[in-house]
Image: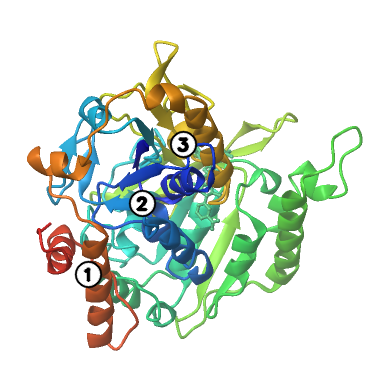
Amino acid sequence: MLSVAVVGSGPSGVYTAQALLQQSLVPDVRVHVLDRLPTPYGLVRYGVAPDHEKIKSLQNSLRTVLEDERVTFVGNVGVGGASGAGGAGVVSPARLAELYHAVVYCVGASADRPLAVPGESLPGSYSATRFVSWYSAHPDIGADPFALDARSAVVIGVGNVAVDVARILARGAGELRTTDVPRAALSALEASRVRDVHIVGRRGPSQARFTTKELRELGALPGARVVVDPAELALDPAYAAPDGLPGSPPLPAVVRRNLAVLRGWSADGAAEGPPSAAGTARRIRLRFFLRPVELLERAGRVAGVRFARTAPDGAGGVRDTGGYEDIEAQLVLRAVGYRGVELPGLPFDPARGTVPHVAGRVLREGVPSPGEYVAGWIKRGPTGVIGSNRSCAKETVASLLEDAAALTRRTAADDPLAVLRLWGLRPVEWAGWLSIERAEAELGRSLGRGPVKIPDWPGLLAAARNGDSRGA
Ligand code: NAP
C-alpha cells in the first residue's frame, strides 16, 4: 500500500490525488489531502471570481475526487508555515514525512508580486490578491472593509486578475446578490461610488496577458462601457498589422482575438462622453504603454498614479519616451501577478518563487529528495489556466510512481490522523466541511440568497464543529 499526503486542496492538489487514483501501477493507494484552511478547493473557492459560476462549478468535479473512498480531506492543518489566523495547527515537512511514504506539495503561489515603486503601501493602495480574497470571503482577510468611496480606481496590470477585479468594481452589486459573495463585501459594493476604472498595461495590447473571453465580458456589463483610445492601440505594431509583420512569426490566436475585440471597442469609443448624468454608469478605460513609477499621495491617502509613457522597443519590450501621465485614483489595485511563498523546511528558489525540482521531484542541494514532490504553481510558477494543473500533476505523479518501490520500503503511520491529533492538531475532516456548506446554505436562506460564504475563522470552525463529533 502506498500512502501519500498531498498538501493543498486547490486544483493542483486535487488533480494530483486524481492522478494517483487513476493509475494502475500501484492499485492500493491511500491519499490524504491536507489544507491549512478548513475548506477545500483553494483558488477555485478563494480566487475564481464569484460571477464566474461556470468555472466555480468545477468544484463539483474536484468534489468527486475528494469523496473517493481512498481519499481523506484533512483541513485546518498547516504545513511548515505559521499557523492560520484562526489557529490552524502546523506540522513541519520533516514530521509530515514520518507519516506518509510520499508528500506532494501543491501549495500554490499565495503572495502578490511587489510593484516596487514609491507610495505602493499608501492607504487606498492594495494588492489585487487582497481585494480578491475579500470578495471571496477568505478567512485571513475577514470583513476588512474596502470602503469603496473612491470615484476613480486604477488597476495596474493587464492579466486576467486585473480584468476580474475591474469587472467586480464595474458590475452592479445587484447582479452579485445571486452569488456567494459575503455580506460585508456585498454591502460595500452596493454602496460603491466608483465610476471610473482604469486598467493600465506597461506594454502594448498585443502583449496583454488577459484571455479573450475574460476581455469580452468587460464589454457585456450592464451599466458600464469600455473606452479605448485608437491612437494608443495603434502604437503597437501588431495592432496596426494584425495579419502579422513581415519577417515575424504569426500572432498567437489569443492575441489576434484580443486585438479584434479592442478594435471593435475603439470604433465605439469615438462617441465617448462623461459617465451618465444620473451618475449610475461606469466607465472602464483600457490603457496601454504606461509604466507605473509612483503612487501619488494627498492627505495621507493615495490620490493617483504617475506613469511613464512607453513605446515599443521592437523586441517585445518597451522603452520610456520621457513623457509622463498622472491618472487620478483614490483606489489602486496592483494586479501584477502572484508569487510563491517559501515554506519553512522546504527548499525554495527566491528568484523564481518556486521549489526547485526535476519532473516534480523536490531537489535538496541539487539532488532529488526521497519522498518529496511538488505540483502546480509552487512547481512551475503562477501561470496557465486551471486545466494546466492537470498535466502538471500527472508529470509529478509519474515521477512518484517510478519511485514507488523504494518509497513503500519506508515506514508510514497506519493512522496519520490519529498521530496528527496526538501532536495537538485539530483536523477538520470531510464531515466538517459538509457542515460548513450546510451553514453557508442556511445563512444564504436567512438572507433570501443562495449559499453565502462565511468569511471568518471562528465562523468556519464553529460550523465545522457541528459536523465533526471529535471537534475542529
Ligand atoms: P499575469 O497573467 O502574469 O499578468 C500580470 C500583469 O501584470 C501583466 O500584464 C504584466 O505585464 C503586469 N506587470 C507585472 N509586473 C509589472 C510591473 N512592475 N509594472 C506594471 N505591470 C506589471 O498575472 P495574473 O493576472 O495575476 O494571473 C495569474 C494567472 O492566473 C494567469 O495564468 C491567469 O490567466 C490566471 N487567471 C485566470 C483567470 C481566468 O481564467 N478567468 C482569472 C484570474 C487569473 P508584463 O506582461 O509587461 O510583465
- Disc number for residue 225: none
**Which quadrant, please, contains the C terminus?**
bottom left
Residue ID at (39%, 10%)? 365
Left/right of residue 61 with respect to residue 207 in the rendered view: left
Q: Quadrant of residue 39?
A: bottom left
Q: Where is residue 465 in the image (x, y as percent from the top left)?
A: 12, 64
Q: What amino acid is at disc 2? A: Val
What residue does disc 2 label? 71
The first of marks 1 and 2 along the sequence is 2
Cα distance in 3D space between marks 1 and 2 = 18 Å
Q: Where is residue 22 in the image (x, y as percent from the top left)?
A: 53, 48
Left/right of residue 406 with respect to residue 310 in the rendered view: left
Between 446 and 79, the one nearer to me in the picture: 79
In the image, is residue 152 above or below residue 87?
A: below
Q: In which quarter of the image is residue 186?
A: bottom left
**Which quadrant, please, contains the N terminus?**
top left
Q: What amino acid is at disc 1? A: Ser
Colour approach in the figure = rainbow
Query: Do tag 1 and tag 3 residues touch (Cβ < 8 Å)?
Result: no
In the image, is residue 147 above or below residue 117?
A: below
Residue ID at (29%, 42%)? 121
What residue does disc 1 label? 435
Left/right of residue 16 with respect to residue 256 in the rendered view: left
Neighbourhood count class around disc 1 (C-alpha, 10 Å): few under 14, some 14–19, many 20 upward:
many
The first of marks 3 and 2 along the sequence is 2
Q: Position of residue 434 (x, y in %)?
A: 27, 68
The residue tagged with tag 3: helix, strand or loop? loop
Q: What amino acid is at disc 3? A: Ala
The first of marks 1 and 3 along the sequence is 3
